[in-house]
Image: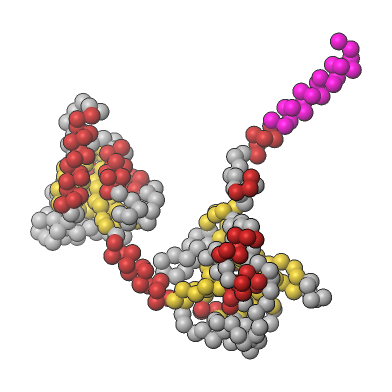
């Protein structure tokens, strides 16, 4: 083989290796309609109290002109996708003084709060700050022969209006918006939705050793679950760590999980309980020894009792454990003196 041919082969191998390396280091890509790659953005959503959530990574909303025309009215499309401007003093939200949140009409991303709305006299709804800085994107606009700052929805690139540096304190900014690109959610509705959601929440209570460890496990549950720790199933009020460790109070260290049954099933929580401790160990989990570290399920409803008993029976019949399952299945806390409510807001030392 000639020297020139050897050199050519070496070059081909190197190029091929680099191509493979580049493909691997780019990582997985998410495909979207049309074969393009999905773009992600950072933004904040609306929590149940009407305030911004933590920053979340979400997929950018990308649609064709035909899709946007099918979703929007002609007026909405002209402004949001065509960068038009509605006539002054004609917008539906210009004089709206009701408390609430203004969101993007195209994708629903929260953009402005009524608390930042003010009367600018310009004829367009005006705000001195955004709902969250991540939710607004600024872009230089020279369309009228002057330099302005266009504002866009970060998630879908809808044209919203412009921002100027002639607003009131504390920001000195004036976000000038087109009403037609906004949707409005009254604060009263946000509160009503929160109350309705709270009414649907259920509680589940488990003891499986040190409550800080057990709480860490159940905090991983997705779907609106929250956790609290405390002592339960004891004989007198106001237990302390020292009194519980005396083994005279009868309390168990436990975790109460508040969850939305439409998003998280009780059976799923039971599976987490069984899989993350040794239910055959009596009054002990790992290095933690004492009656307060017993394995127990405290049911809140007859349905939970039936589900807990059925899951325990399945586990016993599975043959996973050679020793008998020691988990107690008993009613959740009721008024003293039989069972005590949780002592919450405990913090690890």
In the rendered image, residue 241 lying in the magenta stretch gets the answer no
Task: Decide if residue 116 is on the left or right side of residue 312.
Answer: right
Above or below for 248 versus 105: above
Task: Decide if residue 158 is on the left or right side of residue 244.
Answer: right
Question: What secondary structure is the stretch in magenta mostly built from?
Answer: helix
Above or below for 327 versus 236: above
User: Whole-percent x and y of residue 86?
Assistant: 65, 79
User: Whole-percent x and y of residue 171?
Assistant: 62, 77
Q: Which residues are magenta?
A: 1-20
Task: Decide if residue 254 is on the left or right side of residue 103.
Answer: left
Q: Report which quarter residue 307 is drawn in.
A: top left
Q: Report which quarter residue 50 is drawn in.
A: bottom left
Above or below for 75 versus 271: below
Q: Could you tell me if residue 212 is visible in this image?
A: no
Above or below for 1 versus 151: above
Residue beneath the point at 59% across and 44% down: 30
Task: Decide if residue 92 is on the left or right side of residue 233.
Answer: right
Residue beneath the point at 30% across and 37% down: 275
User: Whole-percent x and y of residue 91?
Assistant: 59, 82
Outermost residue, top side:
1
Outermost residue, left side:
337
Quadrant (top left, top right, bottom left, bottom right) of the N terminus: top right
* Colour setup of the view: secondary structure
Q: Could you tell me if residue 293 is visible in this image?
A: yes
211 or 118, which lies in front? 118
Residue beneath the point at 69% across and 70% down: 83
Residue beneath the point at 67% across and 77% down: 85
User: Whole-percent x and y of residue 283?
Assistant: 19, 39
């Amino acid at each position: 083989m000639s020297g020139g041919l050897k050199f050519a082969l070496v070059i081909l191998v190197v190029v091929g290796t680099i191509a493979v390396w580049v493909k691997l280091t780019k990582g997985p890509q998410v495909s979207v309609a049309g074969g393009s790659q999905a773009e992600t953005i950072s933004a904040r959503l609306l929590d149940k109290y009407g305030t911004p959530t933590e920053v979340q990574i979400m997929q950018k909303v990308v649609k064709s002109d035909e899709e946007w025309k099918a979703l929007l009215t002609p007026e909405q499309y002209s402004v949001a996708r065509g960068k038009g401007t509605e006539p002054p003093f004609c917008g539906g939200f210009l004089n709206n003084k009701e408390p609430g949140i203004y969101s993007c009409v195209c994708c629903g991303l929260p953009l402005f709060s009524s608390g930042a709305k003010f009367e600018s006299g310009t004829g367009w709804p005006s705000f001195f700050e955004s709902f969250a800085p991540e939710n607004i994107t600024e872009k230089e606009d020279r369309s009228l022969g002057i330099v302005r700052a266009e504002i866009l929805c970060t998630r879908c690139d809808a044209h919203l209006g412009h921002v100027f540096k002639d607003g009131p304190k504390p920001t000195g900014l004036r976000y000038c918006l087109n009403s037609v690109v906004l949707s409005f959610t009254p604060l009263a509705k946000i509160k009503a939705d929160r109350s309705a959601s709270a009414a649907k929440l259920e509680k589940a209570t488990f003891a499986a050793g040190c409550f800080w460890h057990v709480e860490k496990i159940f905090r991983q549950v997705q779907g609106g679950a929250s956790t609290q720790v405390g002592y339960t199933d004891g004989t007198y009020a106001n237990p302390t760590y020292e009194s519980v460790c005396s083994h005279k109070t009868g309390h168990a260290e436990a975790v109460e999980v508040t969850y939305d049954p439409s998003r998280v099933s009780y059976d799923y929580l039971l599976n987490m309980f069984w899989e993350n401790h040794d239910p055959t160990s009596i009054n002990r989990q790992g290095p933690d020894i004492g009656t307060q570290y017993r394995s127990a399920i405290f049911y809140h409803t007859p349905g939970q009792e039936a589900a807990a008993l059925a899951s325990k029976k399945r586990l016993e019949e599975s043959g996973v454990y050679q020793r008998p399952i020691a988990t107690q299945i008993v009613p959740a806390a009721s008024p003293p003196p039989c069972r005590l409510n949780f002592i919450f807001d405990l913090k690890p030392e």
